[in-house]
Image: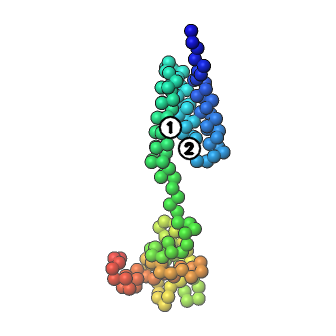
């Protein structure tokens, strides 16, 4: 009678799965995580059902491919950083906010945006020879230092005819 020299038990899959999960802690690619998870599932299936080693390997490969595909197609796009922090001032130009502190010739005012822009919802602002009041909607036209140069929506729309207010 001929014995099989290479026998894989369910606990082998379990150990392989945990080793791959531990490797993931040192190699943050989220690749070995899915191979490890697939190996743990194969261990559970092998304990419950008497399946051959070739079927176990096929199940492991298929599950690994499904997990990787699901990660890159569905989960990873949800974790993309959509903030504009660190992108420079050009992302602020054209944003629309509301004056909450009226700018004066000798001191800056304050504009608030409905959504934080580059990490802050309120910014110091000034105008160029234009009066704006508290509550006016303004558009950012330029940046000087850490202050925004704003213009009222009416004045800005008059200079940019193709823009609707």
Viewer-side residue, 16 vs 107 = 16
| Residue closest to the eye, 50 or 2 | 2
Q: Which class describes the residues within 10 Å of circle 1: few (<14), some (14-19), or many (20+)? A: many
| Label 1: element kind | helix
Judging from the image, the colouring scheme is rainbow
Q: Residue furthest right?
A: 26
x and y, in percent, of residue 163 in the image: 35, 78
**How many badges with numbers are in the image?**
2
Label drawn at residue 31? 2
In-image side of 149 versus 24 (left or right): left
Residue wearing tag 1: 64
- Identify whether 9 is placed above or below 130: above
User: Is 36 placed above or below 122 here?
Assistant: above
User: Which mark, by number, is residue 50?
Assistant: none
* Among numbered discs 2 and 1, the one appearing first in the sequence: 2
Secondary structure of residue under mark 2: loop
Separation (CA) of disc 2 from disc 1:
9 Å
Q: Nearer the viewer, residue 44 or 9?
A: 9
User: Looking at the rendering, in which quadrant would you find the C terminus?
Assistant: bottom left
Q: Quadrant of the N terminus?
A: top right
Q: Position of residue 55 (x, y in %)?
A: 48, 26
Q: Could you tell me if residue 153 is visible in this image? A: yes
**Residue in the picture at 45% in, 82% down:** 151
């Amino acid at each position: 009678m001929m014995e099989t020299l290479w026998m894989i038990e369910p606990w082998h899959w379990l150990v392989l799965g945990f080793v791959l999960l531990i490797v993931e802690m040192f190699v943050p690619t989220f690749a070995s995580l899915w191979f490890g998870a697939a190996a743990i599932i194969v261990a559970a299936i092998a304990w419950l059902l008497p399946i051959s080693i070739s079927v176990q390997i096929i199940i492991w490969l298929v599950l690994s491919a499904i997990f990787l595909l699901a990660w890159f197609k569905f989960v990873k796009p949800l974790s993309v950083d959509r903030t504009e922090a660190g992108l420079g001032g050009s992302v602020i130009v054209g944003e629309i906010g509301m004056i909450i502190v009226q700018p004066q010739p000798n001191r800056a005012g304050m504009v608030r945006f409905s959504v934080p822009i580059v990490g802050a919802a309120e910014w110091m602002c000034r105008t160029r020879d234009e009066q704006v009041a508290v509550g006016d909607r303004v558009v950012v036209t330029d940046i000087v230092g850490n202050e925004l140069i704003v213009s009222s929506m009416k004045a800005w729309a008059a200079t940019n005819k193709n823009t609707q207010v």
